[in-house]
Amino acid sequence: MTDRRLFIRLPLALMAGTGAWRAARAQQAARLETARIIVGFPAGGTVDVLGRHVAERLRGGYARAVLVDNKPGAAGQIGILALRDSAPDGATLLLTPSSMLSIYPYTYPTLRYSVDDVAPVSVGAYMDHGVAIGPAVPASVRTLGEFIQWAKGHPDRANFGSPGAGSMAHMVGILLGQSAQLDWRHVAYRGAAPAIQDLLGGQISAYCGPAGDFIAHAPAGKLRVLAVAGGKRSTFFPQVPTLSESGHALALREWYGLFLPARTPPATVEAASAAVRAALASPELVEQGRQHGLEIQSSTPQELQALLRADVAQWRGLVQRTGFTAES
């Protein structure tokens, strides 16, 4: 029996002839009344912004109402647990950075979920991480090399924030510290927004996080972006060198993905994926993503599944080689 809650986009051809009225009624009845996108971080960060743009474009089609449900805590883990425990009816999606699924299984010894608890729907966006400093560091410090020397000379102020313990941003900071032989203290936050607030307020010296977190503040000189962690320069900060160009052989990139609970029927997953891919194809959403340092992309559930599995294998080896943990 067809799940009446599942929204299936019918080809226009089915609307022709004597079946038009029946098809229209079936489509209307199948549409969800309310759907939500869980975001495991506070409002205001990059992942939250993307979630709200996607929700706006799913509204009225995939479901009559689509809300963003912020569930911050445990560096994004609370959001995944909330998805895991949700009904597998297509009404609850999760938007999360890949770290929570590809790195956390190896950095948190008591993780309460696994990649088998989620059903991939679509990639949402790719992003680069960056290293930025704020007013706690003298204005004369303009390069990564200069900052490292300053931090070594001021060990009591050598610290960096990240959006969450055990995340890729956290790992960028740890790997940079190992490469530079810099002993700097990690300060974990419950998302990007509070971390950036403390960076701008001088409570922390540096921040490792999505490059999009810097876009609103760097042009005004409120913070200085010293390097990006991708394999090539960011299109959003073309004047900023990569970590590799700065003498540190590191190249890391992260993606955001949308997921449903693992028990969701395949037909429901495919319908959700089709709706999400259509939303992500919106030129307006692509431009909005660029304003936040995101390269909007989409995928099939099968493509996201393969990407996730490859990332899990890559990070297993990297974490084991570096000894990285959420407490690092």
Image (cartoon, grey):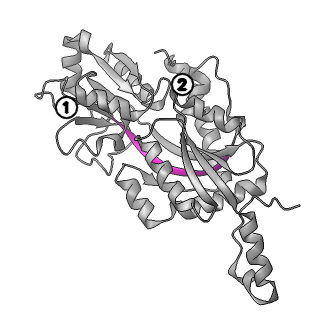
Look at 41% across and 40% down and name the residue there: 45
Q: Nearer the viewer, residue 143 or 23?
A: 23
Look at 59% across and 57% down and name the residue there: 65
The residue carrying mark 1 is 143
Q: Quadrant of the N terminus?
A: bottom right
| Left or right side of 203 for 232 | right
Q: Quote the CA–CA distance across marks 1 and 2.
A: 33 Å
The tag earlier along the polypeptide, 1 or 2, is 2
What amino acid type should be assigned to the residue bearing mark 2?
Ala
Check the image and report above or below for 146 versus 256: above
What amino acid type should be assigned to the residue bearing mark 1?
Thr
Mark 1 surroundings: few (<14), some (14-19) or many (≥20) residues within 10 A: some
Magenta-drawn stretch contains 244: no
Q: Nearer the viewer, residue 295 or 23?
A: 23
Q: Nearer the viewer, residue 107 or 239?
A: 107
The residue carrying mark 2 is 74
Q: Residue furthest bottom?
A: 17
